[in-house]
Image: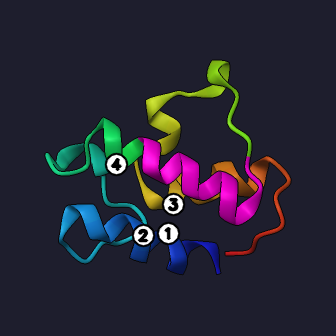
Amino acid sequence: MVSDRMLKIIGKPTGTPLGESEDLRGFASFDSLSFLEVLTWLEGEFGAEVPDDELRSEDFSSVGKIVDFVLGNGTEAGR
């Protein structure tokens, strides 16, 4: 499931167990480099392509929102 895998990946830089609605912007350790790593992982893992003009921080502010974004872009994934 996308959300379980995302929680594991994103939990690494935060060093904290996360829930789907946890605001990632509140973690100092989840910085711009971590964000780019997540985007790269999404592209490789799910074939998600995120055009530059669609990069909005509110779409990537929590694991749940990232999952919704991935699923909304027609990738082969499931919650």
- CA gap between label 2 and label 1 equals 5 Å
**Closest to the observer: 26 or 51?**
51
Where 66 sits versus 6, above or below? above
Q: Quadrant where the C terminus lies?
A: bottom right
Q: Are marks 2 and 1 in contact (CB under 8 Å)?
A: yes
Mark with earlier residue (4, 1): 1
Q: Quadrant where the N terminus lies?
A: bottom right
- CA gap between label 4 and label 1 equals 13 Å
- CA gap between label 3 and label 2 equals 13 Å
Mark with earlier residue (3, 1): 1
Left or right: 10 as drawn, with respect to 66: left
> In which quarter of the view is residue 52 placed?
top right
Identify the colour scheme used: rainbow
Residues in magenta?
36-48
Identified by mark 1, the residue type is: Met
In the rendering, which numbered label is found on residue 34?
Answer: 4
Q: 10 Å neighbourhood of mark 1: few (<14), some, or many (≥20)?
A: many
Mark with earlier residue (4, 2): 2
x and y, in percent, of residue 8 in the image: 41, 77
Residue at left 14%, top 46%?
A: 28
